[in-house]
Amino acid sequence: MNDAANYLEQTSDELGDSWLPRVYVQRVLKLRTRAYEFPVMSKHATPQIHHTLLGIELKVGGRRMLCPDLATARYLAVFARIGCRAVAIPYDITKISMIADELDSSWHRMLLITDRLTGDRNAAFRARLRRQIIGKVRDEIAKAGAGPRVPEFKQITKQSTEPQKGTKSTKGNARH
């Protein structure tokens, strides 16, 4: 195993359950989700959140994506930083903010741990390792998948065939 692979493994081991792909699989994909595909973006674009008259926008490179709220913009910004093509978004908007916090925290912890582990190495090695870690995270998220395009609704409606008490049935009363 090469040196960079050792650092990758150390970083993911040290993060444990906070490893970003693990958070994505355990916290996001367990929920009812819908798939979101990012438009084609430039490789090294930094996501920025803008508050406009039309609402919240996530700007990545020259692309602007309208978001329904700030939590969704923060959530998508994490995946835009990684360079993901498609991700799952929780359908329940009340859960997005907390998950966005976890993902963002995981992202920053991952970078801090990598910097701490490679502090004695040269800048070129640190940059290469950072690219490899981001690539590994992106690959694991892509492998986990973006979920269904439209959320699945398992809703059983109970429509009785008998009329409610106190009402008359129209069955058999049709005039010929």
Image (cartoon, rainbow, N blue to C red):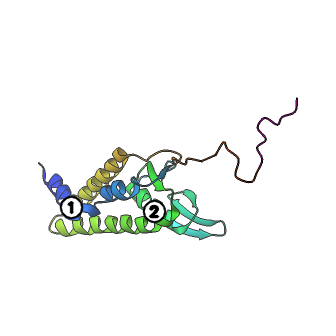
Q: Earlier in the sequence, mark 2 or mark 1?
A: 1
Q: Secondary structure at mark 2?
A: helix
- Magenta segment boundaries in residue numbering: 168-176
Front residue of 160 and 91: 160
Residue at the limit of the structure toward the top, as seen here: 176
Tell me, yes or no, if residue 175 can be seen here. Answer: yes
Asked whether the beta carbons under mark 2 and mark 1 sit within 8 Å of each other, the answer is no
- Placement of the C terminus among the 4 image quadrants: top right
- Which residue bears the numbered disc 2? 75
- Asked if residue 144 is positioned above or below residue 92 in the image, the reply reads above
| Quarter-of-image position of residue 103 | bottom left
Query: Crowdedness of circle 1 by 10 Å Cα count: few (<14), some, many (20+)?
Result: many
Q: Residue 77 location in percent, x, y?
A: 45, 62
Query: Crowdedness of circle 2 by 10 Å Cα count: few (<14), some, many (20+)?
Result: many
Name the kind of residue labelled 1 in the image. Thr
Q: Nearer the viewer, mark 2 or mark 1?
A: 2
Name the kind of residue labelled 2 in the image. Tyr
- Which residue bears the numbered disc 1? 11
Residue at (16% x, 64% y) in the render = 121
Q: How many marks?
A: 2
Q: Is residue 22 left or right of residue 171?
A: left
Residue at (33% x, 56% y) in the render = 26
| Quarter-of-image position of residue 143 | top left
Q: Residue 91 location in percent, x, y?
A: 51, 56
Tell me, yes or no, if residue 44 can be seen here. Answer: no
- Asked if residue 140 is positioned above or below residue 65 in the image, the reply reads above
Residue at (42% x, 65% y) in the render = 100
Q: Residue 127 location in percent, x, y?
A: 26, 59
Q: Residue 138 location in percent, x, y?
A: 34, 51
Q: Is residue 37 left or right of residue 8?
A: right
Whether residue 143 is in magenta: the answer is no
